[in-house]
Image (cartoon, grey):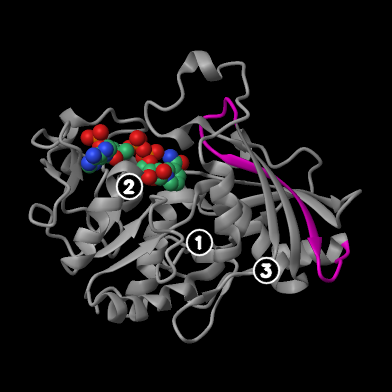
């Protein structure tokens, strides 16, 4: 675990406790933490810290010090750019949460319940970069939540335009994150670099692997507005959408509620039974009530209705550090393991 001490790193550690296939063997973070025990280096945020992890020494983020074959990275983007390729060059499979390599043409950008099949691009990446390791990314947390709701609609009706307005939890800014005097009783209509990430990543996530190892991005436009709100966990996205073929509200609800994701995801240890839960309550989804749906790995969609300008509007909510970060990385690793693709 690289970046093991941060908000996403801690989520990884909680989710990997008692995992049937993977074991956290080593933890690493910045020079501020390296050399301390994990217990002393970490301001632990939720529930009890697992005793076996608490005793681990925090290592520096170098392939000489961290020897495990599978490397989950929750590094800050300032460090990920240099550190992650070093591990891939050293033959390790890196599953990254950072923004740095998401848009690289040979790096899969994967929301497992949307496009796990894009992980097959790893074989071409290994050949082109002449490394036996690999670099896989998962998406921006708000883009992940929006992509989960848009995937079934895109497949069935073809997206042409998407307007997305997000209300994003404070845990999305890591720890210590947004100062309490800035966010309590407030809404901040700006999250640095978030809107361009959502606009660029959605067409890549919903794109298609062309069989020759590169992606054809999906051809729809995205306009995003991102807001930080005083919610602990859970990003909400309000979507207004135009399609090639306008669906009825009931056809859209059927497409959403019958979505089962790509082949081979259902039944993996971290996969929720149902990736999209559709609520017909007039006032859902809500972070307080719905953020932990499917142990944080499902999104909840509600308020599916006709739009006055485009075709449809809807609201989707998902857990930013689980399905939007650590949980997605773990599910990607499970999918690769189930196909025998963890190693070259
Ligand atoms: P965070 O709480 O600030 O944690 C950052 C981690 O990176 C810490 O473990 C920190 O170690 C480590 N780090 C910082 N600078 C480093 C350096 N120079 N060398 C080595 N390690 C360094 O951030 P976070 O929210 O967990 O986010 C982690 C990554 O996931 C970011 O790239 C973020 O954009 C992405 N992400 C976050 C979310 C979310 O909801 N929070 C969702 C999706 C993706 P120290 O403790 O030693 O400083």
Q: Mark 1 = which residue?
A: 111
Q: Is residue 81 left or right of residue 331?
A: left
Q: How would you rate the neighbour count of disc 2 (Cα within 10 Å): few for under 14, some for 14-19, many for 20 or more?
A: many
Q: Quadrant of residue 253?
A: bottom right
Circle 2 — which element?
loop
What is the span of residues highlighted in magenta in the rendered image?
A: 228-248
Q: Mark 3 = which residue?
A: 219
Nearest the eye: 177 or 210: 210
Q: Which badge, 2 or 3, comes first in the chain's sequence?
A: 2
Q: Quadrant of residue 92?
A: bottom left
Q: Mark 2 = which residue?
A: 74
Query: Does residue 17 show up?
Result: no
Q: Is residue 58 left or right of residue 242?
A: left
The residue at 53%/49% (across/down) is 197
x, y (%) of residue 110? 47, 64
Q: Is residue 285 above or below residue 333?
A: above
| Residue depth check, mark 1 versus mark 3: number of the one nearer the observer | 3
x, y (%) of residue 249? 86, 60
Q: Is label 2 within 8 A of ligand 1 (CB to nearest ligand atom)?
A: yes
Q: Is residue 24 above or below residue 264?
A: above
Residues at marks 2 and 3, CA–CA distance in whole angstroms: 30 Å
| Residue depth check, mark 2 versus mark 3: number of the one nearer the observer | 3
Residues at marks 1 and 2, CA–CA distance in whole angstroms: 16 Å
Circle 1 — which element?
loop
Q: Quadrant of residue 89?
A: bottom left
x, y (%) of residue 146? 63, 53
Q: How would you rate the neighbour count of disc 3 (Cα within 10 Å): few for under 14, some for 14-19, many for 20 or more?
A: some
Q: Which badge, 1 or 3, comes first in the chain's sequence?
A: 1
Q: How would you rate the neighbour count of disc 1 (Cα within 10 Å): few for under 14, some for 14-19, many for 20 or more?
A: many
């Amino acid at each position: 675990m690289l970046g093991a001490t941060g908000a996403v790193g801690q989520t990884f550690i909680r989710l990997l406790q008692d995992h049937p296939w993977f074991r956290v063997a080593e933890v690493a973070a910045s020079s501020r933490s390296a050399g301390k025990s994990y217990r002393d280096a970490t301001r632990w945020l939720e529930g009890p810290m697992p005793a076996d992890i608490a005793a681990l020494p925090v290592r520096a983020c170098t392939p000489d010090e961290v020897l495990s074959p599978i490397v989950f990275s929750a590094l800050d983007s300032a460090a990920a750019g240099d550190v992650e390729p070093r591990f891939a060059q050293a033959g390790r499979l890196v599953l990254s949460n950072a923004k740095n390599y998401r848009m690289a043409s040979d790096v899969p950008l994967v929301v497992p319940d949307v496009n796990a099949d894009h992980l097959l691009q790893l074989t071409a990446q290994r050949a082109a970069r002449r490394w036996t390791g690999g670099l896989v990314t998962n998406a921006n947390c708000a883009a992940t939540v929006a992509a989960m709701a848009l995937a079934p609609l895109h497949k069935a009706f073809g997206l042409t335009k998407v307007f997305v307005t997000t209300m994003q939890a404070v845990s999305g800014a890591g720890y210590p994150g947004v100062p309490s005097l800035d966010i309590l009783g407030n809404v901040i209509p700006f999250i640095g670099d978030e809107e361009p990430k959502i606009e660029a990543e959605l067409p890549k996530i919903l794109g298609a692997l062309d069989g020759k190892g590169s992606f054809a991005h999906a051809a729809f436009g995205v306009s995003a507005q991102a807001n930080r709100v005083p919610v602990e966990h859970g990003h909400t996205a309000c979507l207004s959408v135009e399609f090639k073929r306008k669906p009825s509200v009931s056809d859209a609800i059927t497409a959403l509620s019958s979505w089962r994701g790509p082949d081979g995801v259902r039944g993996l240890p971290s996969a929720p039974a149902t990736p999209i839960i559709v609520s017909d309550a007039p006032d859902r989804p809500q972070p307080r009530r719905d953020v932990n749906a499917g142990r944080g790995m499902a999104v909840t969609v509600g308020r599916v209705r006709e739009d006055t300008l485009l075709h449809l509007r809807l609201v989707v909510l998902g857990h930013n550090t689980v399905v939007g970060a650590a949980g997605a990385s773990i599910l990607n690793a499970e999918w690769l393991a189930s196909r025998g693709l963890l190693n070259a």
